[in-house]
Image (cartoon, grey):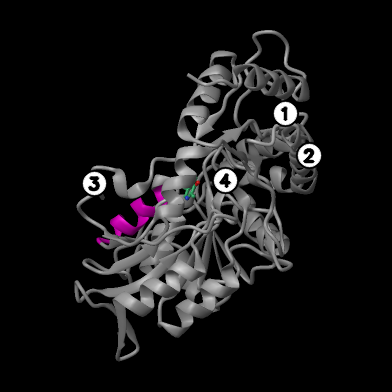
Amino acid sequence: MSQHLTEYQNIIDSIRRIFEAKENEFIPLHAPNFIGNEKKYLNECIDSTFVSSVGPFVDRAEKDLCDYTGSKFAIACSNGTSALHIALKLCNVEQGDLVITQPFSFIATVNAISYCGAIPVFVDIDENTLALSPKKLKTFLETECTIENKTCVHKATGKKIKACVPMHTFGFCAEIDKLNSICTEYHIDLVEDAAESLGSFYKGIHSGNFGKFGTISFNGNKTITSGGGGVILCQDEDLAKKAKHLTTQAKVPHAWEFFHDEIGYNYRMPNINAALLCAQLEQIDNFIEQKRNLASQYLSLFAKFPEIQFLTEPNDQHSNYWLCSVLFPNKLERDAFLKLANAQKTMCRPGWELLFTLPMFENNCVMSDCDVSINIQSRLVNIPSSPYFARI
Ligand SMILES: Cc1ncc(COP(=O)(O)O)c(C=O)c1O
């Protein structure tokens, strides 16, 4: 039994005050805002009859995303998971290969690895960024792997390590420049799972622009949403063309003929989703400003409770604060808070179960020391993080 329930009640009351919640009003973890041109663009889209995977909003969304992120190319996809799947395919990840990722991530990261027939290698996270640790990655590669003919090989299994997928957790960026140089040294392709980090910049460069590919999600719970949607960022024209080809059923462009030159995927973002995305992108600076204001209110609030640590953006980055997080001293205290908050319609949730504990991976992965992930997972709570004015 926690001895701190009075303090936790205080925190919950303060969160509800920040959101100006009425009695019994539900505060979601993250709700979308449709306060711009969303309805206008959706109407235009419907009036034009172009609601599927061809239409002007898809092209415009890709251009707007390049402008916003500074990426040379952007390929709009049906969701963040499909974007990741195609990125890994274009890194030649095949049946029986290994792909490094972090155990503390949403299931989609590792599902995309499995769609390619590859097996995940779990390397620990860093306690400041909550993303893949460069130090642990280096140790794993130095001690467990070797380089043969410009390919990284895992000594114990003899399998090739084709790619590494760090994830920018809750909008905090990994130390992505360090990860990039380690991967380059070991001939491993870097794919950034930037699903949660639209609007997060590392040393002034947008997340997703460091690796061979970066992928972002526009699911309804993200900083901005297209309903469902995602994007692949890349800096190489050839790769961008290949990505677009694979996401559009590998159809060879022609005005009326149907020729497909390989097995492709129906992964293109529909125009109706792109219409929503264009309207949302117009407001992203405003949303992020609101979210960062919320983070500073939380910082002052949690300063009064020294046992609970509010996580602030690590050095060298500007975070979107997608989901604000706090660390409790232990699992017992975390669970006591979760129970109290959720009973009072204040949505808070723990971090994801570690991926190597899930039934489909527990005996089908390569493990390394993941002490930080285990510790963080048992203590972390995400607290309501919608832009300040988002009340439903
Ligand atoms: C870390 C991470 N990777 C991938 C995804 C997949 O994105 P989507 O839901 O758009 O498929 C998400 C979010 O949903 C995510 O949080």
Observer able to see residue 50: no
Residue that label 2 marks: 290
If you read the primary sequence from the N terminus, does the residue marked by circle 1 or circle 3 appear first? 3
x then y, percent, for residue 327: 58, 39
Residue that label 1 marks: 390
If you read the primary sequence from the N terminus, does the residue marked by circle 3 or circle 4 appear first? 4
Residue at 26% x, 69% y is 97
Residue at 30% x, 91% y is 149
Residue that label 4 marks: 218
Residue at 70% x, 32% y is 305
* Mark in the foreground, 4 or 2: 2
Q: Secondary structure at mark 4?
A: loop
* First to last magenta residue range: 108-117
Please tell me how crowded label 2 is: few (under 14), some (14-19), or many (20+) other residues with Cα within 10 Å: some
x then y, percent, for residue 282: 76, 47
CB under 8 Å between discs 1 and 2: yes
